[in-house]
Image (cartoon, helix red, strand yellow):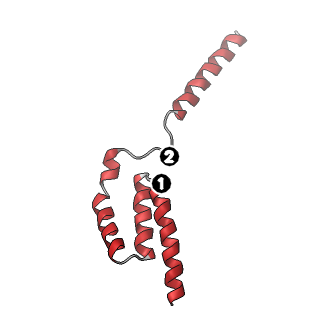
Amino acid sequence: MFLLCALLLVVIQHLIISGRSQGSPLSPLPVLAREGGEDEVRQLLRHAAEQPTSDIYTRLSACYEKRGEYRRALMYLRKAEAAREIEDAAE
């Protein structure tokens, strides 16, 4: 009886663990969640091309992070840091 219960517990634990591991927390968001900020991203990209500031790059980074595009978010965060250094040096 003990062996049967132990085997049952191992099977249940395996099902719980394998059920959680199927989805990755770093996977991109579903399409519907990504579409919401597309207009905002386009507008911010246009402003960044015209007048690049650390604020615009930071906002772009936040938009990409919300969409699950972490590499782009990190890229714009680095651009924001570089722009902030330039802005601080100009003051």
Q: Position of residue 35 (x, y in %)?
A: 30, 52
Q: Is residue 59 above or below residue 26?
A: below
Residue indicated by mark 2: 26
Q: Position of residue 2 (x, y in %)?
A: 72, 12
The reply to whether callout 2 and callout 1 are in contact (CB within 8 Å) is: yes
Identity of the residue drawn at 58% across and 30% down: 17
Query: Which residue extends farthest right?
Result: 2
Q: Is residue 27 above or below residue 39?
A: above
Residue indicated by mark 1: 70
Secondary structure beneath dot 1 equals: helix
In the rendered view, does 40 fall on the left or right side of 72?
left
Identity of the residue drawn at 41% across and 58% down: 64
Secondary structure beneath dot 2 equals: loop
Q: Amino acid at mark 1?
A: Tyr
- Numbered circle sitting on residue 31: none
Query: Which residue extends farthest bottom?
Result: 91
In the rendered view, does 26 fall on the left or right side of 51?
right
Residue 65 falls in which quadrant of the image? Answer: bottom left
Q: Amino acid at mark 2?
A: Leu
Q: Position of residue 3 (x, y in %)?
A: 71, 11
Query: Which residue extends farthest left?
Result: 39
